[in-house]
Image (tube, rainbow, N blue to C red):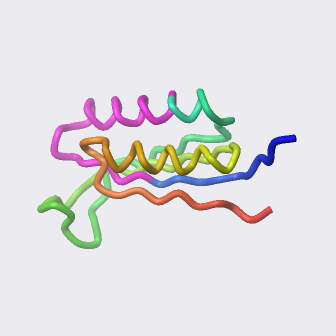
Amino acid sequence: MAVINSYEAVFVISAKNGEEAAAEIIKKFTSLIEKNATVESVDEWGKRRLAYPIQKETEAFYVLFNFKSEPEFPIELDRVTKITDGVLRSMIVKKEA
């Protein structure tokens, strides 16, 4: 039987290309998570000021995903976020039961 864990992932998405580009990235990751995991919630925090500049940007869109999956999927999700243009930062954390 497969082990299923709960995770949360926060993505900081560049505001440089506008809301439409951020929405496309959010849609891309939502569909990726839906294909490989069970999505519990997607919470779009909207455009926020960054605590410090990242790649000369001072504002970004934040989105929080809560999902359940097997332990292998967050590794793949992290890999995809690192190679996706427009994602400034990401963090995936396993929730304690």
Q: Residue furthest left?
A: 56
Quadrant for residue 50, please give it: bottom left
Left or right of residue 56, residue 67 in this image: right
Question: Residue 96 location, x and y as percent?
Answer: 74, 65
Q: Residue 61 location in percent, x, y?
A: 33, 49
Q: Nearer the viewer, residue 74 or 38?
A: 74
Question: What residue sits 23% from the left and 72% below the top?
Answer: 52
| Numbered circles on residues, count | 0
Residue at (87, 41) in percent of width and height: 1
Going by the picture, which residue comes out furthest to the right?
Answer: 1
Q: Residue at x 69, y 61 (%)?
A: 95
Residue 40: which quarter of the image?
Answer: top right
Asked whether, in this view, residue 36 is left or right of residue 24, the answer is right
Identify the magenta region.
11-31
Left/right of residue 47 with respect to residue 11 in the rendered view: left
Q: Residue at x 27, y 30 (%)?
A: 20
Percent across and percent down for residue 55 are 16, 61
Q: Nearer the viewer, residue 3 or 86?
A: 3
| Principal secondary structure, stretch drawn in magenta | helix
Task: Tell me residue 58's x, y (percent).
Answer: 19, 62
